[in-house]
Image (spheres, rainbow, N blue to C red):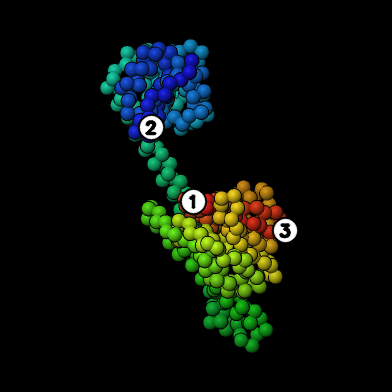
Amino acid sequence: MSFTEYGDKHNSKTILCVDDEPIIRNLCSEVLEDYRIFQAGDGLEALRILGTEEVDLVLSDVMMPNLDGLGLLQKVKEQQPDQAVILMTGYSDKNLILRALKAGADDFINKPINILQLSTTVEKVFEKQKILFELADLKRTEHLKSNFLGLISHKLKTPATAISLFIQNIAEGVESPDDDNFKQMVAMVQSETVHLEQLIQDLLYFSDATLQEEELILEPTNLGDFSEQMIFSLQPTALNRKISLENLIKPQQPVISLMLNQQRIGFAIRAILDNAIKFTPAGGVVTLEMKREQGQLKLLIKDTGVGISASELTKIFNKFYQVDPEQTGQIRGFGLGLYYARDFISSMGGQLLIESQPQQGSLVTIQFPLPD
């Protein structure tokens, strides 16, 4: 028996009604007409539907052939613990209700079905589900905030401690300008000061890019010219690390304008270039090129750096994850650049792709569909 879908409802919630009696299924569909409804005649058919369709709530009878409501409940909760399930039963068997609750049933409806009870129970379960999701989001946000604050504390502590100790030694007369080590200490403190400034700048940049209003404002953008500005701004950093940062972008004829959010695309390009410079040893090269291929405008950022192993390539887009090729635990930055770069590019209809092998450098591709 094939399942039936009722209409294209305005309500985005989807309910799967499972009962071996068509009259019950039709009654539920009529009462819950504001929802998108699927029907199934038994538990096995319901599982097939759940395997192919997104369902927000399963409304199932208990007594059915092939696979009954309790069996369906157990299998659903095994596969999707958060799936909402309401059972319909004509029995007031306390043992049955206890078994269903232990298996994770969200609520019950008595048969014969009371129309008011049916609609209010469904609404109550959806409201409960909404609250649970909001609580989960809050916990996830709190966890991320805690991790981020801990990371900031760790990253800022190292340079701040080095600078503080040096100043303290000078104040106590331990360091002397005539000492041979003094110049080395000064160079180290200067380096840590630059690093501290960069961390603060990164924090400000992250806050500007991630806390903007939800409405995404797109405007015509020449990706080539925009990328050249990023290269120009990062040239001092590359020169300081003795790395050649080369612009291979050729003038476009005709000029191609993409509809982009300039703050977000700027963040993404800067984050990728910054990573390429960070992981390329002195004497290396970072290049930026642009191509038109297969209906896509591609921005290619290539480096001769340390590269990334296959196992780490699957993790580099995770929040706070940082590649540490030398296993020093001293990688600078917050591990957020690639996460937000991919997210921002995706929000504008593009893709971020990375190819890399250890000791063979990396190739990062930012691509957007060419306008008609």
Q: Tell which of 353 and 120 is nearer to you.
A: 353
CB atoms of marks 2 and 3 within 8 Å: no
Q: Can residue 372 be seen?
A: yes
Q: Count residues near mark 2 (Cα–Cα under 10 Å), then give few for <14, some for 14-19, many for 20+.
A: some
Residue at x-position 63% and y-position 82%: 182
CB atoms of marks 2 and 1 within 8 Å: no
Q: Count residues near mark 3 (Cα–Cα under 10 Å), then give few for <14, some for 14-19, many for 20+.
A: some
* Residue 213 in which image quadrant: bottom left
Residue annotated with mark 2: 13
Residue 293: x percent and y percent? 60, 53
Residue 201: x percent and y percent? 48, 67
Q: Amino acid at mark 3?
A: Gln
CB atoms of marks 1 and 3 within 8 Å: no
Residue 264 placement, left or right of 253: left
Among the two numbered marks 1 and 3 on one chain, the one whose residue lies closer to the N terminus: 3
The circle drawn on residue 359 is 3
The circle drawn on residue 372 is 1
Secondary element under disc 1, as helix, strand or loop, is loop
Circle 2 or circle 1, nearest the eye? 1
Q: Is residue 314 above or below residue 9?
A: below
Q: Residue furthest front?
A: 254
Q: Amino acid at mark 1?
A: Asp
Q: Can residue 154 be seen?
A: no
Residue 286 placement, left or right of 24: right
Q: CA distance from mark 1 to mark 3?
A: 40 Å
Secondary element under disc 3, as helix, strand or loop, is loop
* Residue 324 in which image quadrant: bottom right
